[in-house]
Image: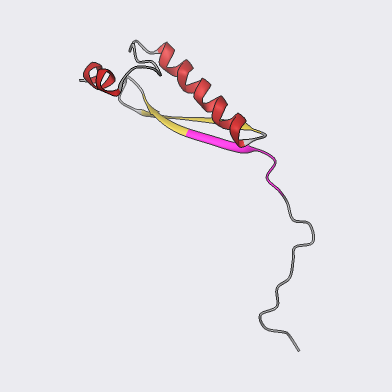
Amino acid sequence: MSVVGRWVTAPRPQKATRWKARVYLRGDDGFRHEIVRFARTRRAAEGAIETAIEGALLVSDAPIKRTMPLLAAGQHWL
């Protein structure tokens, strides 16, 4: 005889051990590139992805920086 609607807990629940941060960046070639970073905490993963984005933008010929106003970046893109 089985009991219907009974909740059973998992014997060994697992917690996440690392966070994954992912972003897509469109390069000068017009293609979308995926950048992925992993870290033990969410904040560290987000920080790692921001560092990777800044590094990718520095390699580019575009003078776009984090502090550049959106209007100026749009004019440069056009």
Quadrant in the picture for the C terminus: top left
Closer to the camera, 65 or 8? 65
Q: Residue 7 falls in which quadrant of the image?
A: bottom right
Percent coordinates x, y for residue 59 in the rendering: 42, 12
* Type of colouring: secondary structure
Identify the residue shown where x is 54% and y is 35%.
21
Identify the residue shown where x is 58% and y is 37%.
20
Q: Residue 66 falls in which quadrant of the image?
A: top left
- In the visual, does 51 lie left or right of 77? right
- In the visual, does 46 lie left or right of 32? right
Give the magenta part as a residue range.
15-22
Q: Is residue 52 magenta?
A: no
Reply above or below: 73 against 4.
above
Q: How many marks?
A: 0
- In the visual, does 45 lie left or right of 13? left
Q: Residue 23 falls in which quadrant of the image?
A: top left
Quadrant in the picture for the N terminus: bottom right
Give the residue furthest to the right: 11
Give the residue furthest to the bottom: 1
Identify the residue shown where x is 70% and y is 41%.
17
Q: Is residue 21 magenta?
A: yes
- In the visual, does 18 lie left or right of 24? right
Reply above or below: 53 against 22.
above
Percent coordinates x, y for residue 55 in the rendering: 48, 16
Percent coordinates x, y for residue 2 in the rendering: 73, 85
Reply above or below: 36 against 76.
below
Identify the residue shown where x is 68% and y is 45%.
16
Percent coordinates x, y for residue 42 in the rendering: 60, 36
